[in-house]
Amino acid sequence: MPTSFIPWTLVKRGVNRQVITPLDAPQEFQEEATWERQARESLQDTALMRAFELAYHWQRLLDGQWVESIAEIAKAEGLDITQVRRIMRLTLLAPEVVERLTGSPDFLLEQVMRRIWSDDWCEQMQIMRLSDQGQQVD
């Protein structure tokens, strides 16, 4: 029995769903689908997001006393204790700083990890403001 393949996309419009094939897709839909795909791809985890996820996960393990020390985490993860400590420093950043860092594709993990961050959240926000103004802050 012959079969044929027809590519289609299921689109959710409010509570209704609509099947769109390439043959009947209006230009407006194709642009919207492209925009949605790009938005979805931009939300995918970056190395920086993954580092924040690990740091907060490890902090929860420590806070909940699931592990006794950073050394235990390092051993379980197969990482050097220094690497775990560097990543764990991300938990000391102000929530606003974390939001800005993860919300912008301009910040890379290497940049964030190399920067020496103050423990003071106000100073961290000042660094972010200077960074937004295009000033080099180390």
Image (spheres, grey):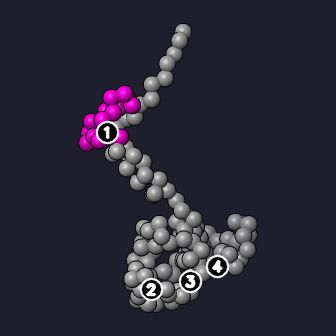
- Which residue is the site of mark 2? 135
Residue 137: % across, % down: 50, 87
Residue 23 part of the magenta-drawn span: yes
Q: What separation in Å lies between label 3 and label 4 (alpha carbons)?
A: 14 Å
- What's the residue type where badge 3 is placed? Arg
Quarter assignment of residue 125: bottom left
- Which residue is the site of mark 4? 85
- Which residue is the site of mark 3? 115
Question: In percent of the image, x 39 and y 83: which residue is there?
Answer: 133
**Is 138 on the left or on the right of 97, as rendered?**
right
Q: What separation in Å lies between label 2 and label 1 (alpha carbons)?
A: 42 Å
- What's the residue type where badge 2 is placed? Gln
- What's the residue type where badge 1 is placed? Gln
Q: Quadrant of the N terminus?
A: top right
Q: Could you tell which of marks 4 and 1 lies nearer the N-terminus?
A: 1
Q: What separation in Å lies between label 3 and label 2 (alpha carbons)?
A: 14 Å
Identity of the residue furthest to the front in this view: 27
Q: What separation in Å lies between label 3 and label 1 (alpha carbons)?
A: 46 Å
- What's the residue type where badge 4 is placed? Arg
Regarding residue 60, the answer to whether it shows in the image is no
**Residues in magenta, as a range:** 12-30
Quarter assignment of residue 71: bottom right
Q: Could you tell which of marks 3 and 4 lies nearer the N-terminus?
A: 4
Query: Which is in the foreground here, disc 4 or disc 2?
Result: 2
